[in-house]
Amino acid sequence: HQVSSRYAGGQIRVEGVGGWGNTTMNFTPANWSNSGNKLHTFELTVRPDGNNMLVVKGTGDGERFERSWVHTLTNGRHLPAIHAWLDLGGPQPLVIGKIGFTVQLA
């Protein structure tokens, strides 16, 4: 997925098969300084049947976006890889906090 805070309303997309193009999140993600050095939360749910969900929680009260898409990313035995990069960013680094997985069997 890709998120941009350069546009009012925030823009996010899931690239590739089953994904969706630029979509307004209905909140503009605050940058590191404006958020008071808080991180946004991304929750990614992938299922063996290919029904996936992305939830983005902003740093402000009530800032939440969720959308699903269909594409098989796991066979139920192996977790997909996660990649992050700063796309068209300025001189500031991309700050990534704790990354964790929650696995539900059955």
Image (cartoon, rainbow, N blue to C red):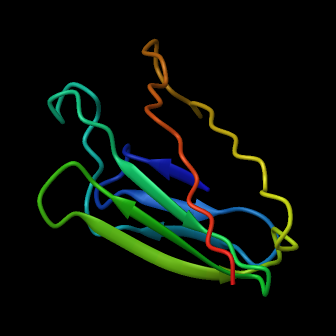
Q: How many badges with numbers are in the image?
A: 0
- The image position of residue 23, as x and y in percent, is 48, 70
- The image position of residue 26, as x and y in percent, is 28, 69
Asked whether 63 or 98 is in front, the reply is: 98
On screen, residue 87 versus residue 61, left or right, reads: right
On screen, residue 82 versus residue 4, left or right, reads: right
Residue projecting furthest to the top: 91
For image coordinates 88% across by 73% down, the residue present is 75
For image coordinates 56% across by 63% down, the residue present is 44
Tell me which corner region of the image, top left, top right, bottom left or bottom right, holds residue 50.
Answer: bottom right
On screen, residue 87 versus residue 5, left or right, reads: right
Q: Is residue 1 above or below residue 77?
A: above
For image coordinates 38% across by 43% down, the residue present is 6
For image coordinates 28% across by 29% down, the residue present is 32
Asked whether 72 or 104 is in front, the reply is: 104
Tell me which corner region of the image, top left, top right, bottom left or bottom right, holds residue 1.
Answer: bottom right
Figure quadrant of the C terminus: bottom right
- The image position of residue 63, as x and y in percent, is 22, 63
- The image position of residue 69, as x and y in percent, is 65, 81
Residue projecting furthest to the front: 105
Tell me which corner region of the image, top left, top right, bottom left or bottom right, holds residue 73.
Answer: bottom right
Q: Is residue 70 above or below residue 19?
A: below
